[in-house]
Image (cartoon, rainbow, N blue to C red):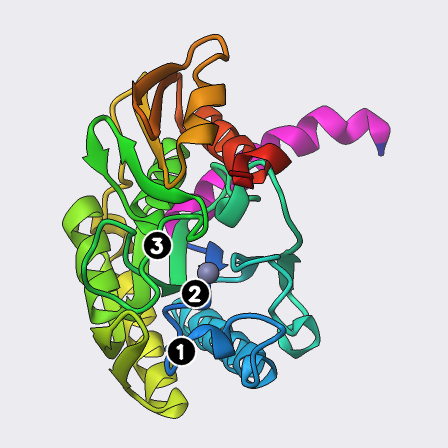
Amino acid sequence: MKLLAPVLVAFACVAVTAQAKDGRKVFISVDMEGLTGVVTGEQLSASGFEYGAFRELMTAEANAAIAAAREAGATEFVVADSHGGMQNLLIDKLPADVQVVRGAPRPLGMMHGIDASFDAAIFIGYHSSTTNPEGVRAHTFSSATLADVKLNGVSVTEGAWNAALAGQFGVPVVAVSGDEAAVAEVKALIGDAEGAVVKWPIGFHGARTLTPEAGRAVIKAAVGRGMARRATLKPYKVTSPIAVEIRFKNYRPAEVASWLPGFTRADAHAVRFTAKDMVEAYHVLEFLTSYPSATEP
Ligand SMILES: [Zn+2]
């Protein structure tokens, strides 16, 4: 078998290219704040009285996306658990042909595992950004520490940042689910992905929401439409090198990060650095939001 290896490698490369045209390999990043029915922290962490129920519902929404992608021809699935400690999904309730990225911190955060072998990306349970006055639990990467994240001077949502990473690998985002504000904000930044609106924000901690069953139907329909239009959806790319600005809620992380080579202090609460690409930008972001002292006053 070893003698045949070069031949097999050659065929493997052809197979990957063919898969890219067929839309068979799908990356699904699943957050919680934008799930159907989520309105407060009671659904979002282990101390909340509804967290267990919403782990079930989060898994069910991931399964709705998987089922719709499968109906559209997908055969390989990587699901990135992308909320909090990133171990919320009930992995025994996912199909056997799914692999799960779980646990944190990790260098590519909500998108760890993405690469150029994927044909489509799907975001489930996403929320609006910390600069958006609308949206349930609106924040960007860290509600405790960050007040804004900019790529090339433009404030982005987690969805847009993650889409830019997928775009570096040539992978288009085909569908995004969340509340109405979250879906509108991501689409305004990255373009024409399909949106699955599962609730309508009333405030930071309130929404008019679909029932879980109806939410899953909306997600299935959006993923189906997105997969069908996949070939026409352009990967979202940002111009490189990328000017990244991270704004902290507290002055201290900005002060000490500005001492690092390559960092400048944009103002009292923000630092700027230049990343050669989104992988590098993501690594720095994950460092700044994971390093213990970054959360101290
Ligand atoms: Zn989250």
Which stretch appears magenta? 2-22
The crowding category of the residue bearing disc 2, from other C-alpha atoms within 10 Å (few below 14, some 14 to 19, many at least 20), is: some
Task: Judge by depth and name the residue closer to the eye, 32 or 98.
Answer: 32
Q: Which residue does the numbered mark 1 point to in the structure image? A: 38
Identity of the residue drawn at 36% across and 32% down: 246
Give coordinates of residue 223: x percent, y percent: 33, 68
| Residue 104 shown in magenta | no
Tell me, for residue 147, which label it has, or none.
none
Identity of the residue drawn at 14% across and 51% down: 188
Gap in angstroms between the C-alphas marked 2 and 3:
34 Å
| Amino acid type assigned to the residue bearing label 1 in the image | Val
Q: Find out whether the residues at labels 2 and 3 contact each other: C-beta distance under 8 Å.
A: no
Say which quadrant the N terminus sits in: top right
Q: Earlier in the sequence, mark 1 or mark 3?
A: 1
Identity of the residue drawn at 61% across and 75% down: 47
Asked which secondary structure carries label 1, the reply is: loop
Between marks 2 and 3 in the image, the one whose residue lies nearer the viewer:
3
Q: Which residue does the numbered mark 3 point to in the structure image? A: 139
Gap in angstroms between the C-alphas marked 1 and 3:
14 Å
Asked which secondary structure carries label 3, the reply is: loop
